[in-house]
Image: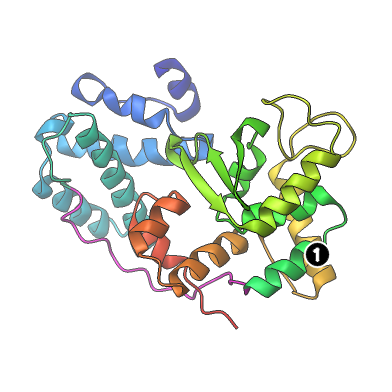
Amino acid sequence: MVERLAAAGGEIALAGAWLPAVVWLGGANTLATRQTYLKALREFARKAGSGPAEVTVAHVAAWKAELVSAGLSPRTVRLRLSVVRSFFEWCIGQGLHPGPNPAGGVPLPRVGRELTGRALTRRQVAVLAGAALNRRDSVLVWLLATGLRAAEAIFLEQRDVHFEGDGLRLVVRGGKGGHSRQVLAGPEAAEALLRYIQAGRRLVAVRAPLLQALDGSGRRLSYGNVYRIVRSCAVRAGLGHLAPHDLRRTYITEQLDLGVALPVVQRAAGHALMEQTARYYRPRP
């Protein structure tokens, strides 16, 4: 593990008491995420000196002040503090820090920006799914509208699908940060998925990708495929520009509009922090 991380992110500089951080870094599901986490933890470890068990709010506050003094943007400071906060949540769960989270008591800098992306109404999601050229693409739209990230939808396998009543339960294995969770979907997604599975002779093994290429190769879709499918469906549906993540925003916005508690939506979305979930809210037409 250490050798792989060294190759991916340069010098680790996380040794001794900080070595458990290597295990936590291994949970990142992409190389880019791992490198971002590594950079933040490496800088903080150098500043704090002693191991995770000794870190206090004062250590984190001093590091934040140092980052701000260095002229880093509020967005960058916020990102690095969020990484450290997530790491110490993990440490507390592993018994490597007595708690409470030392980064939890340090306010994240505010980031002034215009909100990007949008959320659809339930009717617009149905129109979008109806504009799909085949059953697979319609299923993809409904799955993304359950709050799945594009990467999570891509890596779903047949064994992860469980029909329950008129709905659907999906097991998301190894989501962002290496965390697994269960996602519930309504009858529209369940019906579309059932028709797709029944018609798909390619889907023969429980470990087979759920969303496969249409050429019979059994290959899973790529993110580029997902983006192109959503974009083309949106054009045909007359919805203008739309990205896969807008369907995730749609799910979170819909749940909050329905009065579902923010922590519940946070867990369903697979976010580490409630503020991440809150940032996804978009007023709908």
Type of secondary structure dominating the magenta stretch: loop
Side (left or right) of 158 relative to 127: left
Point 35% across, 25% down: residue:
23
Q: Hey, what amino acid is under mark 1?
A: Gly
* Bounds of the magenta segment: 103-121
Which residue sits at x=71%, y=28%? Answer: 208
Horizontal side of 27 relative to 198 (left or right) equals left
Q: Quadrant of residue 185?
A: bottom right
Q: Quadrant of the C terminus?
A: bottom right
Q: Which residue is most to the right?
A: 215
Secondary structure state at the residue bearing disc 1: helix
Q: Which residue is mark 1?
A: 130
User: Residue 50's spot in the image, x, y percent?
Assistant: 13, 30
| Residue 194 belongs to magenta span | no
Q: Position of residue 31 (x, y in %)?
A: 52, 34
Residue 104 lies in magenta, yes or no? yes
Closest to the observer, 115 or 9? 115
Percent x, y for residue 281? Answer: 47, 70
Residue at horizontal 39 percent and vertical 31 percent from the top: 25
